[in-house]
Each structure stands twice: as C-alpha cells, then as structure tokens.
Image (cartoon, rainbow, N blue to C red):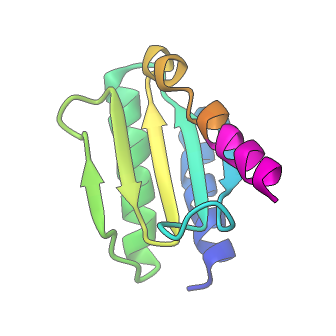
Amino acid sequence: MQTEELKDLAVTALEDLKAVELKTLDVHEMTTVTDWMVIASGTSDRHVKSLADSVVSRAKEAGVRPLGVEGERQGEWVLVDLGSVVVHVMQPRVRDFYNLEKLWSSVESARAQEA
C-alpha cells in the first residue's frame, strides 16, 4: 500500500469514529523515521482506545500489519506505528501538554534556518 493511501486510511478510520482536531503532518523531509504523522484527540480514554483500534483494524483489513501499538492500556495517548505513517491519538490535556504540532513545526523552522 502506498504511503498516501495508508495516511488516508488512517484519517478515514479516525473520522468515522468522530476524532477531534484531526491533523496530518508531512514530516518526510524532517525525519527518516516516518513520512506522515496523523494526530487526533479523543474525548475520553475509551474514545482514544476506540479510535486507535479502528486504525489498527482498518490497516489489518487492508493487509498492513502495524509495527507497534503503544499506550492502549492507559488510553491517554495511543501511538499506532504503521511504518510510513505514525498515528497519535490523545486526550486533549495530553495533546496540549506535548503539543506535537508545534514541536514538528519547530523542527521544520530550525532546518530552514540552517539552510
């Protein structure tokens, strides 16, 4: 499966279960770890877990086995590693604290200044 298709699959899985503040970040020029980060919030620990489970299920249905899933037990921040796409599903307070969107935009700004 192509990277764009995998990203779209994750986004659709999250949208179908009403993820909040869904964002996609193209990070392929900033890291060799992944090409896309998908970040979304859930309204409760149960919602966060359900959102992550939906991504995992959809990926498996499409023949993609996740490389790893972390944080399912607590349900505050679940990371689903699909290789070229990494999905972060968080409760709003955890998302506000770590602010991944700002972190990755800071990396991009620092790289632009180096060039």
- Rendered view: 74 above or below 24: above
Residue extending farthest to the top is 93
Report the number of numbered marks.
0
Question: Residue 13 at what x, y percent from top left?
Answer: 54, 54
Kindly identify the residue that appears in the image at 58 percent across and 50 percent down.
38
- Give the extent of the magenta segment: 104-115
Kindly identify the residue that appears in the image at 56 percent across and 37 percent down.
40
Question: Residue 44 at what x, y percent from top left?
Answer: 39, 19
Inspect this view and state whether residue 4 appears: yes
Kindly identify the residue that appears in the image at 65 percent across and 59 percent down.
27
- Left or right relative to 61: residue 35: right
Residue extending farthest to the front is 114
For the N terminus, the quadrant is bottom right
Question: Residue 94 at what x, y percent from top left?
Answer: 43, 20
Q: Quadrant of residue 56?
A: bottom left
Residue nearest the viewer, comparing 54 with 93: 93
Residue extending farthest to the left is 73
For the C terminus, the quadrant is bottom right
Inspect this view and state whether residue 18 appears: no
Q: Is residue 49 magenta?
A: no
Q: Is most of the magenta stretch helix, strand or loop?
A: helix
Residue nearest the viewer, comparing 83 with 1: 83
Q: Quadrant of residue 47?
A: top left
